Amino acid sequence: MTTDGTGVLLKLGGELLEQPNGRRNIARAMHRLRNSGPLVVVHGGGREVDAEMAAKNIPKRAVDGLRLTDSDTLEVVVGVLAGRVNTRLVAAARVAGIPAVGLTAADAGVSPMRRADTYTAADGTQVDLGWVGTPVGTEPPVLLTRLCDAGFVPIIASIGADADGQLLNVNADTLAGHLAARLSVERLLIAGGTPGVLDEHGDTIASLTAGRLEQMIADGRASAGMVAKLIACREAHRGGVASVRIVSGKNTTNLDDSPGTTVDGR
């Protein structure tokens, strides 16, 4: 994968990876995508983090789909995402014949981070997100390009580190949009548990213009989790990614045919 506008960046919602059958289906879908060119995968795992936090009696706090991350929360996030979720997905991918390599955004400059600024929520309030990272940099990540050029599939947990080595939680959608732009991929696919962006009646919006996307973010019509996805789509388009889709990843081995929303950058 180089800066020639090829390849796919696939972001997987954690809800798709919780059960063995779901991981098998996703691994088969990844294999199909890889047949058409280089593939990089970014994954979340929010529900498994929530369950682990509940077991440890750590309260969850979030705004616009972004997890507020204190030190106790960070320890859980790192353990669940970089450990359990990433390793299980890599193992499932290998069974499907994919030469997968498990990484975090902290590995070898995959995505340098700085601690996020105070966040302006959709309702206008200012929020300190805690140990949350903002991806920085514009150059293609050398490690990812070399792995892809050698035929490997990087699978990246959304954990980063700043210049001082402080671990940071980064929203997986945010990381996916950022890396899609830096890698100059042809396509960004954001796969989750819903069939794309839904309107007020619960029906899938087939195509979303840049103007309508901005309006949905501004007026609060998008759900908290969807806001982060829409912002990621916007950033990918601004970075030159030609095709951006939000699709359902449930019960499918072919994400290209999955119902969803095409996000038009114009």
Image: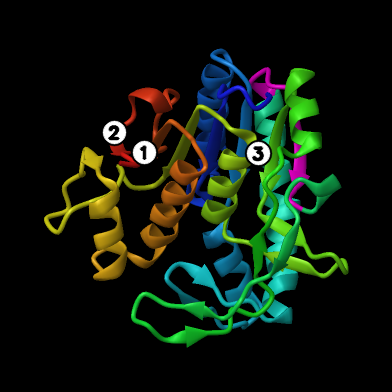
Disc 1 residue type (three-letter): Val
Asked if labels 3 and 2 touch by Cβ distance under 8 angstroms, the answer is no
Q: Along the line of sight, which residue is nearer the eye, 85 or 12?
A: 12
Residue at horizontal 48 percent and vertical 50 percent from the top: 235
Furthest residue toward left: 201
Asked if labels 1 and 3 touch by Cβ distance under 8 angstroms, the answer is no
Q: Indicate left or right for 260 with 203 as reference.
A: right
Mark positioned earlier in the residue sequence (3 or 1): 3
Q: Residue 95: x percent and y percent?
A: 68, 23
Mark positioned earlier in the residue sequence (2 or 1): 1
C-alpha distance separating marks 2 and 3: 23 Å
Q: Residue 126: x percent and y percent?
A: 48, 86
Residue behind mark 3: 89
Q: Is residue 18 visible?
A: no
Q: Residues within 10 Å of mark 3 (few under 14, many from 20)?
A: many
Q: Quadrant of the C terminus?
A: top left
Disc 3 residue type (three-letter): Leu
Q: Along the line of sight, which residue is nearer the eye, 164 or 52?
A: 164
Q: Quadrant of the N terminus?
A: top right
Q: Which mark is residue 259?
A: 2
Q: Residue 78: x percent and y percent?
A: 74, 62
Residue range highlighted in magenta: 95-105
Residue behind mark 1: 247
Q: Indicate left or right for 185 with 86 as reference.
A: left
Where disc 3 sits, the SS reads helix
Asked if labels 1 and 2 touch by Cβ distance under 8 angstroms, the answer is yes
- The quarter holding residue 125 reads bottom left
Disc 2 residue type (three-letter): Pro
Residue at horizontal 31 percent and vertical 64 percent from the top: 217
Is 169 a magenta residue?
no
Mark positioned earlier in the residue sequence (2 or 3): 3
Q: Residue 113: x percent and y percent?
A: 73, 61
